[in-house]
Image (cartoon, helix red, strand yellow):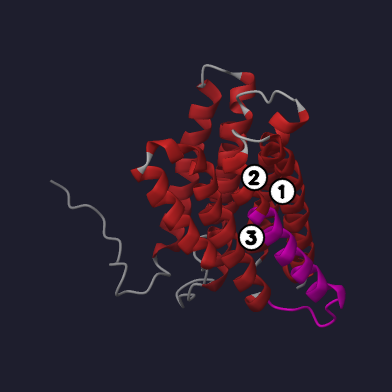
Amino acid sequence: MPRLSRWFLCAAAFYLLGGVTAGALMLSAPAIGVTIPGWVLPLHIEFVMIGWAVQLAMGIAYWILPRHRSDHGRGNEPLAWAAFLTLNAGVLLAGTGWLITPAGGLPALGHGAELLGAIGFAINIWRRLPRSIAPPLRPLPIL
Amino acid sequence: MICLLLGLIAGAVATISPSMAAIRPTWIHLITVGWLTQLIFGVALWMFPRPRTEPAKAGTLGWVGFWLLNAGLLLRIVGEPMRGFTASGAAILPISALLQLVAVASLLWALWPRVRAR
């Protein structure tokens, strides 16, 4: 398993634990008489859906998709690392941002970072997709 | 697969009957926890490369996680719709939450040596 995949999986595990803890607090709150602040629900959703499920899928895809022969096999490694870091910054901002900026400024920035991370990851993984699924990327014609 | 089927049925019921909207969280968690998370852990425990010396406890931890997760989910399926009607419905939800939390920790602990190994 490549090092970056290990990082993806470790980060996914961290978010799963954090997300499930937030969910457990929300589920228990009425019975134990605790009021849970509103920012816990978006944190729960963000951590579990993007931090855990999406990141796990990315880590496995980076590891398991067929490698191509032309370079080191897994594409542009710095780009893949940048995508990983950007995505994680995005999940942290989108998940915890409501606590700091209730108007939604930081979460919006976080979602933008998640999008950038996902685009970076997709560009890097594109050439490793089977040709029947992914046509080769071509530069746009100059008009 | 059972959770997926139950989840789809719960989703249909919640959509058709507005009075059953309270089971919406149950429906979402049946699919995301009962089906998706269990599918992920099931495939990971089967497919992730084992280290040469995998601790004997790894298999036990996996089973503990499986049973706790399903017990927690079952309590949630029972407790969440009852929450509005009886105090016992609300009372079993913290137990459900704790079981699911311990289950996830246990499953991650079982997988950890496989992610760490080179």
Give x and y (percent) for residue B17. 37, 41
Give x and y (percent) for residue A39. 61, 26
Q: Secondary structure at mark 1?
A: helix
| Disc 3 and disc 1 in contact, CB within 8 angstroms | no
Give x and y (percent) for residue B108. 74, 60
Check disc 3 and give the amino acid type.
Leu
Q: Can you tell which mark lies on residue B96? A: 1
The verdict on a common chain for dots 2 and 3 is no
Principal SS element in the magenta part? helix
Q: Chain of mark 2?
A: B
Which residue is located at x 66 percent, y 40 percent?
Answer: A23
Question: Which residue, given by chain and number where applicable, does mark 3 sit on?
Answer: A4
Check disc 1 and give the amino acid type.
Ser
Give the class, few, some or many, for how many residues have Cα within 10 Å of label 3's Cα (few <14, many ≥20): some
Give x and y (percent) for residue A93. 59, 32
- Mark before the other along the chain sequence, 1 or 2: 2
| Disc 1 and disc 2 in contact, CB within 8 angstroms | yes
Which residue is located at x 87 percent, y 78 percent?
Answer: B56
Give the class, few, some or many, for how many residues have Cα within 10 Å of label 1's Cα (few <14, many ≥20): many
Q: Chain of mark 3?
A: A
* Depth check, front residue: B97 or A55: B97
Question: Which residue, given by chain and number where applicable, does mark 2 sit on?
Answer: B79
Q: CA distance from mark 3 to mark 1?
A: 35 Å
